Amino acid sequence: MPAILTHDLFGRGVLEDATALLNLRTPAERDAFLLGNQGPDPLFYLVVDPLMHKWSPLGGALHDAAPAEVLLAMREAALRLEGRERSIGRAYVAGFACHWLLDSTVHPFVYWWQNGLTSAGVEELDEAAAPRVHAEIERDLDEMVLFATTGRTIERWRPHERTLAASREVLAAVDKIYFYAALWVFERAVDPRTFSTAVREFRLVQRVFDSPSGRKRALLGTAERLARRTPFSLVCSMSHRARPEDTSDFDNRDHGAWENPFTHKVSHASFWDLYDGAHARVLTVLDELLAGELDLAGARALTADLNFEGAPTPPGERISW
């Protein structure tokens, strides 16, 4: 990811500058930009929908694919729209680019923590537990970012109320972008309602996970552990806690050395170093991405061929799903 709050707050932190650059004029366009900051992550939540879950792999495919192709396809799809939908689509694609920028910058750091924890020799805390460990790291960072940037916890900043705002008009426009992008990048025709359904399911899951007191989280976590016969709960690792702290166990505020698991480059950057570095690149990325003359070679230079995971993607590599 990073998780839902970090992406939303990152988008809000650049909204004023993005509004000026993109000339965002309406609440729908601003909502589309902030929704775009969640990137393809809503698609993962299609797994809870019995009729649409078959399209959930699209989220992973977009994370793994060559980012230059994905971003250009999204941009081209937005340009195919007409009237108000085109301006909404353009705003969404700009937010989507912000999601890629933050993900590709921070994800190697998260994976470094994840790999260290799952290889530490703790019983049952192995690679099979990686998704829960990943979610736990990102939740802890999410809680830190929320308090550090707003001075609030989820008691006063509820994820299901503050994020994923989008009208039917916005969702209808973005549905079309995903339909065309999936067709062009993966040669797959997805259900035309794929993204709007995913957002609704994401909203539902966030409401279910909402537990400022911790009581519902504990109940759901116990039920999950019993049902799955595991000591670790994905629900507990994704449900935000009311934690009034501006630090995290995973923020690397002491600037210790860590190794990018994809490039093996050693860094001493903290989470905030990475976050601020991504923030500083937003306007340049958006300006270049939305420039009419940007071609595939330019997009590859812009993205450095780093996908949403922060991993290099070989030229011409095709992702199947």
Image (tube, helix red, strand yellow):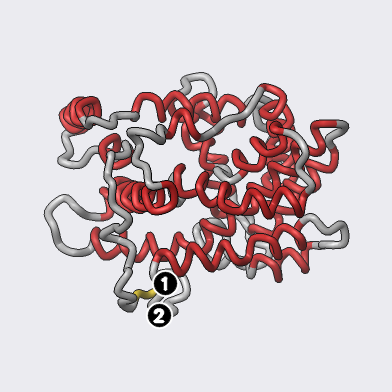
- At horizontal 75% and vertical 45% (from top left) the residue drawn is 184
Q: Mark 2 or 1 closer to N-term?
A: 1
- At horizontal 67% and vertical 22% (from top left) the residue drawn is 168
Looking at the rendered structure, the kind of residue marked 2 is Val
Residue 133 seen in the figure: no
In the rendered structure, the answer to whether residue 186 lies left or right of residue 126 reads right
Q: Nearer the viewer, residue 31 or 221?
A: 31
Q: Are marks 2 and 1 in contact (CB under 8 Å)?
A: yes
Relative to 279, say whether 80 is above or below.
above
Count residues near mark 2 (Cα–Cα under 10 Å), then give few for <14, some for 14-19, many for 20+. few
Does dot 2 land on a helix, a strand or a loop?
strand
- At horizontal 45% and vertical 44% (from top left) the residue drawn is 5
Q: Nearer the viewer, residue 263 or 187?
A: 263
Residue under label 2, please give it: 266
Does dot 1 land on a helix, a strand or a loop?
loop
In the rendered structure, the answer to whether residue 61 lies left or right of residue 83 reads left
Relative to 154, say whether 244 is above or below.
below
Q: Position of residue 319 (x, y in %)?
A: 59, 52
Residue 173 quadrant? top right
- At horizontal 57% and vertical 40% (from top left) the residue drawn is 58
In the rendered structure, the answer to whether residue 96 lies left or right of residue 260 reads right
Q: Position of residue 227 (x, y in %)?
A: 20, 27
Q: Position of residue 114 (x, y in %)?
A: 31, 59
Residue under label 1, please give it: 260
In the rendered structure, the answer to whether residue 180 lies left or right of residue 162 reads right
Relative to 229, say whether 63 is above or below.
below
Q: Nearer the viewer, residue 164 or 321?
A: 164
